[in-house]
Amino acid sequence: MKKSMIVGFLLTLASGFTLEAKTLKFPEPETIDLGTVSPHAKTVGLYLTKEFMEFKHTKKTSPFDRLHYPVGAYSARLFKVNLPQVFQTVVDSDTQTPGEGVDLVVEPSIVSFNAVVPRPAWKPYLATIVYRVDVYDKSGEKIFTQTATAEGQTSKGMMSGFSAGKQCTTATMMATQKAAKDLLEGLLDSEEIKGAGVASAASEPAR
């Protein structure tokens, strides 16, 4: 009898608390500094899957608070802003196979993401992301793939719970921008991408 009363009391107590959740807000991504580069003279389709764009990470910041990281939505904007540094023309694509007038399709994805909200709160806030990018030729065959891992960290005084949202956002932006830069530089240097279409064009009979 006493045990059931205790359980009932605990359930009643728990029902009095509302689980709070907050979604981090990211600013519009900036152009990543790649130095002086010459983009590939190609038209590419940027293929952003639903899984990629809707990727979210949820972090428990207290027994009753949660932070949602909309990493996919931010990453999609990040690649849209910066891929034109690598390719002369970038268009949207809804498939891995290039359509009419498109040379290649670039598909970014998020392999994993993790965040640390520290306790004590003066320790660094961390974010780690692993991106992958796949590139497909005119036939839909994958000709290039690369992964990149990066970490971002920041620390600023005594913050906790929702008040730490800015630190979580900053760490995430640092990680995503570092990893994206590695991928963009890999795309620029790729011999497979540079030579895509050259062999088939050379094999066509002279007219």
Image: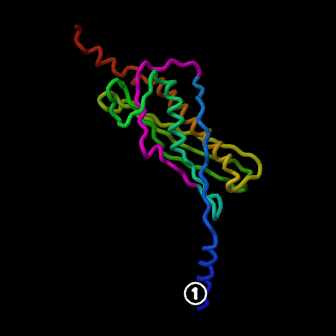
Residue 19 picture location, percent across and down: 60, 64
Residue 55 colored in magenta in the image: yes
Q: Is residue 95 left or right of residue 148?
A: left
Of residues 61 and 30, the one nearer the viewer is: 30
Which scheme is used to colour this image of the protein?
rainbow
Name the residue at 40% across, 23% down.
43
Q: Which residues are magenta?
A: 35-58
Name the residue at 35% across, 35% down.
96
Of residues 65 and 175, the one nearer the viewer is: 65
Position above or below: 117 against 62: above
Pointer 1: what residue? 4
Q: Secondary structure at mark 1?
A: helix
Mark 1: few/some/many CA within 10 Å (<14, 14-19, 20+): few
The quarter of the displayed image where residue 153 is located: top right
Residue 47 colored in magenta in the image: yes
Residue 69 picture location, percent across and down: 57, 49
Residue lying furthest top: 207
Name the residue at 57% across, 39% down.
176
Residue 63 picture location, percent across and down: 64, 64
Check disc 1 and give the amino acid type: Ser
The quarter of the displayed image where residue 50 is located: top left
The quarter of the displayed image where residue 89 is located: top left
Name the residue at 62% across, 84% down.
6
Position above or below: 48 against 40: below
Residue lying furthest right: 157
Q: Which quadrant of the rendered structure holds the C terminus?
A: top left
The number of callouts visible is: 1
Q: Which quadrant of the rendered structure holds the N terminus?
A: bottom right
Q: Is residue 184 left or right of residue 104?
A: right
